[in-house]
Each structure stands twice: as structure tokens, then as C-alpha cells.
Image (tube, grey):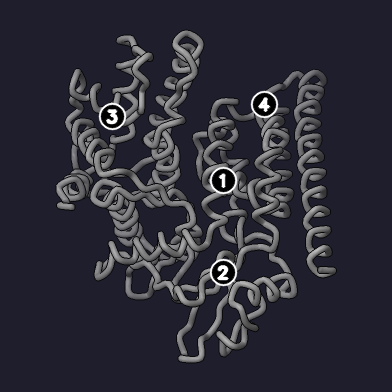
Amino acid sequence: MKQENGHLDELATTRASRLARMTRLGGVMAGNVARAAASAAVTGSMSRASEHMHERVAETLATSLGEMKGMPMKLGQMLSYIDELMPAKHREAYREGLAKLQAQTPAMDWSSIEGLLERNLGAPPDEFFAEIDHEPIAAASIGQVYRARLHNGDSVAVKVQYPGIAESVASDLDNAKLLAAPMFAMVPRVAMEGAISDLRSRLQLECDYALEAQSQLTFADLWAGDDEIYVPRVYQEMCGPQVLVTEFIEGESWAQMMARTDAADRARYGRILFRFVYHSLYAFGIFNTDPHPGNYLFMPDGRVAFLDFGSVHRYEDSTRRDFCELALLCMHKQRGPEMRRVIHRTFGIPEHVKPDEELWQLFETFCIACAEPWAAPQPYKFKPELLADISANTSKARSMLLKRILRDGLWTPERSGIAFMYRINFGLNSLLCELGPETDWREIINAACAKEQ
């Protein structure tokens, strides 16, 4: 009982410390905004003062969010690869300041992890593992990953949830606006609130390692035998609510792959990422919602290993068919009544909301812009201009929807699966534009939508 009370006291102290840090972070960021305004008044250059402000804010975010883990750090990771949320003039400062959150974050000591392992496994770790490294090979927002060897010789990755992280995440969710408020000066309020709403649902899922194990098993089954895509094996008998044991994969990180490969290799990897995401969605009705670079390993045999299935969205088959129908209509840029009927279903537009012609045209333009890789003449090459086009259309959609909300009631596509999907796929498109692949994307989309269930 004394040990349990001590654990609860530690959690309470941790939550209080995190809240205090979030409050201080908000104060620092607000101070940066104020100093930028003062500098502009003295120098007469608001542009340069603003640039300095964004550089300081990005650096502050990277340091503070990395220490806090959980929801604050996951927000930092999201901002580091979803350019849509950042002001166009200052995206490079945020990329540089936050990119380190993608691959590696401050690790916790082994002593904090060993007890949690034993509680989940029901026995000391050495009864399950012949060897286990005490230094993590990866540290992310929810947990750390250790390399180990089983008694039968298998090499495994042991993902361990940070002690008390579920409770800390719940606290962060309650206080998320403390973190978000000072960011509204740099990021549109609707965009930031939408991102926090997504994070709320995603982090709650990611704290459930039993659910993650089942999701990874599902993807492994769906992609079994593929020549290019590999999902690591799950050792179910050793998994618990806060521990996930999977096959260890030898492979290069995103940064290592980018440093080694030529344009042809990068293009092939881009096609693999595209096929994994869109075939999973259109053929199987399942969507892995975390496409950041740390979730891919590039194997020596040329395959890509897909990691981290903590946030997976599943769609009813009727919704999957609607997505396919919309993708094909966008492929042929087929505006009009048929497309609008499908948009009405997939966007979850309530019956009391009656879009006018201007809003319908905006929806059509938005969907076609997001489908540009397979709507444009083929073969199509991913370029940064795609992100700019999607971002511009997204901004127009948000602005117009805000006006409609005031007139027609509280509805926005944030509440439907398709808006969630489009936001996350912006992150995927960012990676594809970095790789620059060129191929006939229509062929991949057609094959996925024609897949028999």
C-alpha cells in the first residue's frame, strides 16, 4: 500500500509539474509575441521581428514539448510534418526547430521502466527475455522501445508505455488550451483546435497497447506475402496493457534512407508508401493515422516495414465504398449532382444544412485538389506545389464553413471521418513531395477500389 501511495503521489507531482510547465511555456510564447511587437516599433521592420519571433517559438516548443511527452510532444510531432498548420513564411523555422521530435526524444531511466514491465508480464523480465538492453533504441510521445532477445533466439522490439503517461495525457487533455492559446498568434484558431481535437482521440487510442496489438495483427494479415510492404510479427502472449512485443526489424531510418538513396530509389519508396495508405483505405477500409517518418524502416531487401499502429481508424464497408466512389469521381473531375451526393454522405452533412452553390463548388474543388495525384494527367510527379494547392483550398473551406456555422448551426466536417483523413493525408503528401516519386497513380487507385471484399 505504501508503494502504491508513493506511486500516486509521484503521479500527482508529475501532473502538477506538467501543468506548471505548460503555463510557463504559454507565458514564454506570449512574451515572444510581445517582444516582436516592441522590436517592430523600434526598428520599423515587422517582417524581421516576426521572423525572429517564430524562430524563438519553434526552439521553445521543441525543447519544452520534448521534455513533457504525451499530448504536448505529440502536438509538436504533428506540427513538425504537417506544414498546413504553419504560416507559409515561417514553415522552415518550425521544420528545423521541431524536426528532432520526429525521431528521438529525451529517454526515461531503466529503473522507471523495469517495474512496469514486471507488472504487465506478471513475472520478472528475465523470465521472458534472455537479454534486454537497458537503453532504448527509440523514444516517442507515449512510450520507449527496447531491443531484446527471447530464450528461443528471436530478436524482438519491446515497446513500453511511460509510467503514468495515461493519467498525464488525461490531464493534458483537460488543460490543452493552455498550450494552444499562445499558438493562436501563429496558427489559425480553427486549425489548432481541430488538431487538438484529433490529438484527443488519437492519444486515447495510443494509450491502449492491447488495441494496438490487434490493429498490427490486422495489418499484418492484410499485407502478408506482399513483395514490398512488411508489417512486423506481434508476440501476443507477451503483450499487456502497457507493453507491446513485436519482431525486431533491421532497417534504415527515414534520415538514413534519404542520405543514401538516389532519385529512382526514393521514387520507388514513394510508390510503396502511397500504395500502403490508399490500398489499405480503399480496399480494406482501414487507415493508419500517423504517417510521420519515424514509423517507417527501410529494410536491406528493399521492402518497407511499417511500424506503430496505435492510432488506426476503421470504416464501415458502406463508407469505404463511398470513399472509392468519390476517389473515382475526382479522378475524372466529374463535378455535379452525383459527386455532391457522395460528398454529402462522406462529409456527414446533416439534413438541416443546405449548402449553397458556392459551398458545393468549394467542396468539389477541395476534393479534386486532394485527389490531384490521380486526377492530373499521368504519370504524375509529386511536387511541393501540391501542398500549396491543398493548403489554399483547405483555408478557403475553413473560412467559408465558419460563416456557414453561424448561419446554419454548429456543423463542420471536423466531425466526420473524411476531414480527419484529409488532414492526416496532408502529412503523407508532405513526405511524398520530399521523395518526389512519379508514376501512374490512377493504376494504384483503380486497383484498390476494384478489390473484392
Contact between marks 3 and 2 (CB within 8 A): the answer is: no
Tag 4 residue: 185
Please tell me which residue is depicted at 56% across the width and 78% down the height of the picture.
147
Residue 417 lies, in percent from the top left, at 39, 37
Please tell me which residue is depicted at 54% across the width and 30% down the height of the picture.
191
| Image quarter of residue 296 | bottom left
Instruction: State which mark lies toward you, 2 or 1.
Output: 2
Residue 121 lies, in percent from the top left, at 58, 76
Tag 3 residue: 368
The 10 Å Cα crowd at callout 2, few under 14, some 14 to 19, many 20 or more, is many
For badge 1, the amino acid type reads Ser
Which is nearer the N-term, disc 3 or disc 2?
Answer: 2
For marks 2 and 1, give the CA distance. 27 Å
Q: Nearer the viewer, residue 87 or 109?
A: 109
Q: Residue furthest front?
A: 1
SS label for mark 4:
helix
Residue 395 lies, in percent from the top left, at 46, 24
Contact between marks 4 and 3 (CB within 8 A): the answer is: no
Tag 1 residue: 80
Tag 2 residue: 243
Contact between marks 2 and 1 (CB within 8 A): the answer is: no
For badge 3, the amino acid type reads Ile
Which is nearer the N-term, disc 1 or disc 3?
Answer: 1
